[in-house]
Amino acid sequence: MRITINGTPRDVAATTLAGALAEADLTGRIATALNGSFVPAALRETTPLRDGDAIEALAPMQGG
């Protein structure tokens, strides 16, 4: 399936958000959005993907 992760088109075998993040080596403490909607970490395993979906994954940053 063809999706976009952080603006980059990718082909993935995953069918869930968690699977796509793992394929892209995006693990650890990150915030995720699917098609512009926030997805909590607890729901990533059960959030299905469809062809053309867009994922944004951001790591928290400290600042002042």
Image (cartoon, rainbow, N blue to C red):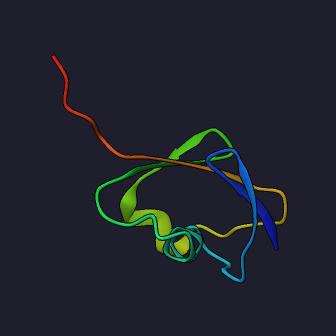
Taking depth in this image into account, of 16 and 64 the one nearest to the observer is 64
Task: Tell me the quarter of the image containing the C terminus.
Answer: top left
* Outermost left residue: 64
Q: Residue at x 59, y 71 (%)?
A: 20
Q: Nearer the viewer, residue 44 or 14?
A: 14
Q: Is residue 46 above or below residue 39?
A: below
Residue 39 x %, y %: 49, 51
Quadrant that contains the N terminus: bottom right
Compared with residue 10, is residue 8 higher up or lower down, i.e. above or below? above
Residue at x 68% of width, y 78% of height: 15
Residue 38 position, x and y percent, is 51, 43
Residue 16, horizontal then vertical, whole percent = 61, 74
How many numbered circles does the render carry? 0
Residue at image location 84% in from the left, 65% down from the top: 51
The image shows residue 55 at horizontal and vertical percentages of 63, 52
63 horizontally vs 25: left or right: left
Q: Point out the residue furthest to the bottom here.
A: 13
Give the residue drawn at x 55%, y 69%: 24
Q: Is residue 37 left or right of residue 32?
A: right
Q: Quadrant of residue 12?
A: bottom right
